[in-house]
Amino acid sequence: MEGFTPSSSSSDSSSISSLQSTMRAFELACTSIQMQMNPSASEGVISSLGQSSQPYHICQFILQNSLLPTARFQAAAAFREAAIREWPLLTPQNKSDFITFCLSYVMQHASSPHPFVQAKVSAVATQLFKRGWLELLPNQKDTLFYQVNQAILGIHGLDVQFAGIHFLESLVSEFAPTTSSVMGLPREFHEQCRRSLELDYLKTFYRWTQEAASSVTDKIIQSNSAVPEVKVCTAALDLMLQILNWDFRCNTNDTKINAANVFSAGVRPDGDSIKRSECHLVQPGSDWRDVLIISGQVEWLLNLYAALRQKFSCEGYWLDCPIAVATRKLIVQFCSVTGTVFLSDDGKMHERHLLQLLSGIVEWVDPPDAVSQAIQCGKSESEMIDGCRALLAVATVTTPCVFNDILKSIRPFGTLTFLSMLMSEVMKVLMTTIIDEETWSWEARDVLLDTWTSLLMPINTITADALLPPEGIKAAANLFGFIVEYELRIASASAFNDESDADYLHASVSAMDERLSSYALIARASADATIPMLMRVFSERVERLNQGRGIVDLTETLEELYSLLLIIGHVLADEGEGELPLVPNAIQTQFVVNAAEADIHPVVLLSSSIIKFAEQCLNPEMRASIFSPRLMESIIWFLARWSRTYLMSSDGIGDKILDSSHHLEHNSKKALLGFFGEHNQGKLVLDIIVRVSLVSLKSYPGEKDLKGVTCHQLLHSLVQQKHICVHLVTLNSWHELATAFCTEQALLLLDTAHQRSLAQTLVRSASGIRNSEASSQYVRNLMGHIATYIVEMSSKSNFKSIAQQPDILQLVICMLERLRGAASASDPRTQKAIYELGFSVMNPTLVLLEVYKHESAVIYVLLKFVLDWVDGQITHLEAKETAAVVDFCMRLLQMYSSHNIGKISLSLSSSLLNEEKTDKYKDLRALLQLLSSLCSKDMIDFSSDSIETQGTNISQVVYFGLHIVTPLISIELLKYPKLCHDYFSLLSHMLEVYPETFAQLSSEAFAHILGTLDFGLHHQDEDVVTKCLRALQALASYHYKETHNGNIGLGAHAMGLKDSSGNFQEGLLSRFLRSLLQLLLFEDYSSDLTSVAADALLPLILCEQGLYQRLGNELIERQANPTLKSRLANALHTLTSANQLSSSLNRINYQRFRKNLSSFLVEVRGFLRTK
């Protein structure tokens, strides 16, 4: 490092004047950074200190003597950087001295007016402590911790006491996996440190901290003014909270509780977005029982907060001061304590613990109306919010019955009733203050909704035995009434808001989905009351529409119906998210109805009312006066969600989830599903749904969102179940839809994505036609006109002159999107017809590619159609058909390449250049996916003969394709993540499966691929680097095995050659051996890559042993320090000899080399990176 003389604390000290001169230079650099003067040079001076060899004495001198805080801060950072890097070179005494120095510095300067410097040095101390954790003897650790304990006890004053607590806070943070610092060490090291701290010290730290907090609380309570003890107490409480937030893992003999760890079709588990509030479970195990439960911790905390609350009751601001916030957070966290820390006494100890907590917490939120009124008059809401969070924590660790019983011993009602009262009050506040900005009531509502979710989520997935107690059912019903009233009030108030975009997003299905999912759980918990209530409210709104039609403005009522349909849809059915959703168990268990009475089942009555209402849109007059596009959108959305669960449900679905003893529940479910089944009302309802869909597509021009819901959700969901398709294809309404698809102008004006989805849906319905030939004929009739249009249009003599006309251009895109949709719907029954469809337009497709070569929108859709068609067909094709498809793909690739290579003009403006790059990125990604689809033929092939009979070799085809495509893929384009991922996925696959074919590429294509490999090897994305390393492993191991057997392997590509200029170019194996060693020894990368890098490095070393020896000798000779030289030589020898490493490339040898490389990097990487 220029400007600084390296020295060590164990060597002769530099003169004071030299040290002062160095310090002044360092201070000047720090000042220049702050003043924005010559920042690059200043940054170089600062960074060079940490990068120099053994700068410890200089760093210590600056820390102890500089008057500039930023200089001390940067010196501490440099000290840490050098020590971590050179740790293997330090003596045990050095290591201990450095930790002691940092710790002593923190304590000695505890009163410093620059806390950021103290925090930095404290962090350095903890990081060095962790780095040496596995090396330090127990007595050495105890000696250091004794100093910390003395500080925390307050023997040396309040400032030192605070510094000691802050040091432990930094230490705990450093040992926690999620907040640990990068040290270039394997995960196993961090896990060993974490486990050791948890088992041996964490509980002790907690006890010390609690004693420190308790030692100052009396003075805080008794004082009439602000005292410095508050700072110490707040820090101690924060550290106690941090320790409780630790991820306890080491109580291996204990059984942990995983509250609400459930899943049911359609209802998302707690880890998904249905919950908005975090609740960390505290599960420390039985070893912590004495310090957390038996010691009276909860009583002490509650008494502390109660005393402070009473003392400052007149000062509303106090609720938000640090000590109040810290105390409440810790109390709330104690509500999350669970597991074997409590005795196995049927939950009695746990219940007493929660009762004690709630006895204190309930004062924060009870009575709800008085607390709410006080907040609206200016009191802080923080206590109210924390009270809600406490209820959430308790709900997370208990069952509904236990939760409800806790409060009964201190209140005349259960906890569920109180929860309902509290949330009802919050909803009242929301109704009286309808504003767009989020307020305390928004947050309180979300936390309380999460509380209900934690209680009710398991109920939605198990049998009737775990339903809410009667009091809880009544409370849920009352609350749901408030919820519906609130949502309808919000909808009505937004009816005349001009800010349509913002309001639409606010009220849309996606924006409301999380809240609606929680509402649904509450409604289902009391379904026998809430579903009839929803029926009543819905009927009232519909009656209001009918009475006011043509007389009064119905906008408010329409908005209310919109929201009501969303709520009802969530209550009756779950989303499914790719699975077939079942009837929610909470609904099954609360109604006892037999098949003869199915028509009076509340769910049947409500569903039928909505379906009948939806059917009225078929009347043009009613449609014009009532059914606005927004209302239609909610109807279509409801029908899509509802039909997936109730419409023609397959026999036997979901029977297993109910115990055979629940005979009445099973009969009730059977009656419910049977009413809308195949042999009852199902086909009639299906016909209504199709007709409503057709109306939404034809009668609402320009309503993109409505048509999107119709195509992508409703119609798409109908064809997902084959037994529904069987009935669909027999309906006149479905044939009307198919006819309209072929002939109606309105459907040609749909958005392109909707065109694709509709085509896919119509073709997929062919699975309901039992006869294979009839199914194929259905597809031909449906899609034949499209193929005919494209063939005729492309063969017109004047096509080039008319192709750019807007109507022609739009129609071509529309037809290609429809072809793409049909291609993506291919299944074994329709495969032949879809192959014929694609085959008939192969040559016209190439004509379109030529004519529209400058129209990026057409090119992209065309490429995606070809991709989807090939992807769906390739594994089913016979050899002759495969040869035709492969030939077509190669012609397409060649034509695209000839049109586009080198066509991105640097003369374009930056915006146009970026747009053109984006277009090329999308095209190239489609072409790479096309090549990947061709690859699948070698892995999955359902044909009766081998493709080799037609002279088709898939590996050669794909490499030829890569040869065509790779010149178009520049390094700039590889900066697009998806393209980069697809490219390296394909390349890695090809090099691993067909390395022998790789050697046959031309020198130009070969060099380009190597250039991209080199780019990928240094990519930020770990997955991309992994793929490149695996590709290198495949190449090197192939070459090593082939040459070992007397073959040429990669041939000329592996040997060094002279280029056209006469310059020597290394072979690829030599090049990447250098590159990989450079990366591993000198560059930054994730430690997770070490194993996959070892798998690539081993065959590279075996292939290039001479070069490896030369590179190793160069590294050794570069070391001026004899000790380092010897150490490096030994490490390099051990790398290729330890653990009985051999020259084979079997699994055991790879595992041995991984261990060797990991140890090698820990040993030498630090001092090799020293400048």
Image (cartoon, rainbow, N blue to C red):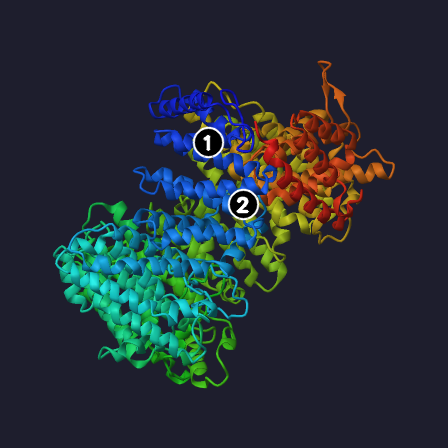
Depth order, front residue of 619/1033: 1033
Residue at point 44%, 67% (across, down): 288
Can the viewer see residue 615? Answer: no
Residue at point 34%, 49% (across, down): 156
| Residue 319 on image: x %, y % | 21, 56
Depth order, front residue of 684/1092: 1092
Depth order, front residue of 1003/591: 1003
| Residue 277 on image: x %, y % | 35, 58
Which residue corresponds to mark 1? Answer: 59
Displayed quadrant of residue 335: bottom left
Q: In this view, does 344 lie to the left or right of 1053?
A: left
* Mark 2 neighbour density, 10 Å: few (under 14) some (14–19) many (20 or more): many
* Mark 1 neighbour density, 10 Å: few (under 14) some (14–19) many (20 or more): many
Q: In this view, does 708 lie to the left or right of 661?
A: left
| Residue 526 on image: x %, y % | 31, 75
Q: How many numbered callouts? A: 2
Residue at point 72%, 30% (across, down): 1112
Q: Which amino acid type corresponds to the residue marked 2 in the rendered image?
A: Arg
Q: What element carries label 2?
A: helix
Q: Which amino acid type corresponds to the residue marked 1 in the rendered image?
A: Cys
N-terminal of the pair, mark 1 or mark 2, is 1
Which residue corresponds to mark 2? Answer: 131
Can the viewer see residue 333? Answer: yes
- Is 1132 placed above or below 332 here? above
Disc ID at residue 1138: none
Q: Distance between the residues labelled 1 and 2?
A: 19 Å
- Residue furthest top as drawn: 1061
